Image: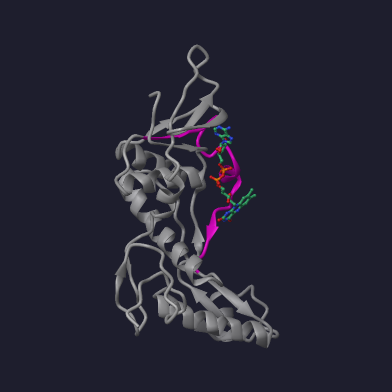
Amino acid sequence: MKSHYRVVVIGGGIVGASVLYHLTRKGWGDIALIERTELTAGSTWHAAAGFHAINDDPHIAALQAYTIKLYQEIEAESGQNVGLHMPGGYSIATTPERWEWLQSEFAIYETIGIEARLATPEEIVTECPIVDPRGLLGGLFDAHEGAVGPHGTTHAFAIAARRRGADVILRNRVTGLKPHADGWLVETEQERSSRSTWSMPADSGHAASDAWPASTCRSRRCSTTTSSPRTCRSCWHVPTRCRA
Ligand SMILES: Cc1cc2nc3c(=O)[nH]c(=O)nc-3n(C[C@H](O)[C@H](O)[C@H](O)COP(=O)(O)OP(=O)(O)OC[C@H]3O[C@@H](n4cnc5c(N)ncnc54)[C@H](O)[C@@H]3O)c2cc1C
């Protein structure tokens, strides 16, 4: 445990572990995660950890699709089983308004390259016999619906981050944060004899949000590769840079 880090991530749930991992992937060294008890001791431990790519906001849909792909990558990189189970799933419509909305969602997923398809009531009931077909107008099948093990996934992020040089410090509650000229003093309870202090640069939040995957716009109008979540107003606000 060092007395100074470039970035300290506080909290070893799925979010903290993922932020730590993404910082290492962006090439950040001299970083640490500090957890008051054990990894996944918070909400993450309770999660059913269900996921799907489908979301009303295409930015979030693209981010979710990225994350789902990442689960397999971090399992391979860390050697830690993430408990991925991805059978796919249906969002169903029993009102014309919702059916119309699902069809417009489908158009968005086609545009941004998320695998999905519209399904008839017959298809849905055949694949999922517990669905009551009365009033069913159709559905949207999301091939990326499923669940992971939150414990395994958090540990996979932490193991992979450690291998890339990050420190993971457990059983050490953060008791205070004090701003100073070069960053933050992070006080913790473990170091009773000498209070631990870490320095965290003011732009560390920006660095975490910058951890966006390089992607190519799948719109017919655009084909530019981007490494930041830019909004393209010509192609459904997909995170991309537009030529138009
Ligand atoms: C019953 C339930 C079911 C859920 N189901 C789903 C689901 O199906 N799909 C889904 O996507 N989401 C689900 N969620 C939501 C999901 O669990 C949370 O959004 C997610 O776990 C939040 O992760 P986190 O890392 O932000 O927080 P947490 O997991 O709470 O992590 C925070 C960490 O910070 C640590 N900490 C706190 N204070 C300090 C301190 N002072 N010093 C050091 N460490 C500290 C805690 O010990 C903890 O480990 C569910 C949640 C619950 C409760």
| Vertical arrangement, residue 190 with respect to residue 53, above or below | above
| Vertical arrangement, residue 122 with respect to residue 231, above or below | below
Q: Image point 36% across, 50% down: which residue?
A: 74
Q: Position of residue 219 (x, y in %)?
A: 37, 81
| 221 relative to 187 in the view: left or right | left
Q: Position of residue 30 (x, y in %)?
A: 34, 34
- Residue 22 is covered by the magenta coloring: no
Residue furthest to the top in view is 193
Closer to us: 13 or 153:
13
Q: Image point 49% across, 49% down: which residue?
A: 149
Residue 117 visible to an observer of this rendering: no
Q: Position of residue 235 (x, y in %)?
A: 42, 80
Q: Image point 40% across, 62% down: which residue?
A: 66
| 27 relative to 131 in the view: left or right | left
| 87 relative to 4 in the view: left or right | right
Q: Position of residue 230 (x, y in %)?
A: 41, 68
| Ligand 1 visible in quadrant | top right
Q: Image point 47% across, 62% down: which residue?
A: 64
Bounds of the magenta segment: 31-53
Residue 228 visible to an observer of this rendering: yes
Closer to us: 76 or 237:
237
Quadrant of residue 176 within the rendered picture: top right
Quadrant of residue 113 within the rendered picture: bottom left
